[in-house]
């Protein structure tokens, strides 16, 4: 039996790689690893955008969803799979929201 969560985690633990088109694209993730790992002799919690994309693509295709999603139903199913996996990994203490994304949620009154 395939360990879907284990493979998903492996993609996130790989060396952080980013993909973006230009300077207007978002370059900072709103999630990070709870525990640091050493990449190129530097401790980091960072997860690259390419790592997130590959993990997302894996999760969809392993669950029988063609990419790009061929219908609104498949798109919603893919989004739910992603959301559920991210919530599960946060609950078990593997991922957390980045401190900067948490600060953005607060409003100073």
Image (tube, helix red, strand yellow):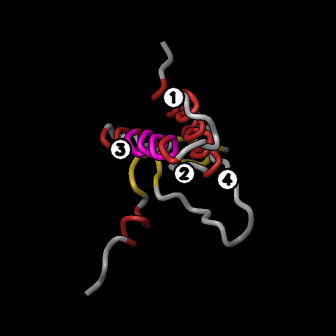
Q: Earlier in the sequence, mark 3 or mark 2?
A: 2
Choose mark 3 or mark 1, whichever is in front. Answer: 1
Binning the other alpha carbons within 10 Å of mark 4 as few (below 14), some (14 to 19) or many (20 upward) gives some
Percent across and percent down for residue 86 are 41, 43
86 and 47: which one is in front? 86
Which residue occupies the foreground of this view, 23 or 42?
Answer: 23
Which segment is the magenta one? 74-84
Residue 21, horizontal then vertical, whole percent: 74, 62
Q: Which residue is mark 1?
A: 63
Q: Position of residue 1 (x, y in %)?
A: 48, 12
Q: Nearer the viewer, residue 16 or 89?
A: 89
Q: Which residue is mark 4?
A: 18
**Labels 4, 2: front one:** 4
Say which residue appears at 60% left-offset and 48% top-offset: 42
First reached walking from the N terminus: tag 4 or tag 2: 4
User: In the structure shown, which secondary structural element does the residue marked by tag 3 occupy?
Assistant: helix
In the rendered image, residue 103, in percent from the top left (x then y), is placed at 37, 70
SS for callout 1:
loop
Earlier sequence position, callout 4 versus callout 3: 4
The residue positioned 64% from the left and 43% from the top of the image is: 68
Q: Earlier in the sequence, mark 1 or mark 4?
A: 4
């Amino acid at each position: 039996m395939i360990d879907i969560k284990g493979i998903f985690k492996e993609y996130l633990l790989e060396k952080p790689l980013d993909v973006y088109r230009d300077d207007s694209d978002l370059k900072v993730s709103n999630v990070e690893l709870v525990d640091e790992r050493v990449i190129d002799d530097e401790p980091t919690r960072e997860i690259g955008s390419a790592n997130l994309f590959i993990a997302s693509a894996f999760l969809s295709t392993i669950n029988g969803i063609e990419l790009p999603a061929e219908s609104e139903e498949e798109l919603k199913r893919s989004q739910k799979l992603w959301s559920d996996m991210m919530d599960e990994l946060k609950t078990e203490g593997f991922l957390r929201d980045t401190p900067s994304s948490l600060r953005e949620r607060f409003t100073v009154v």
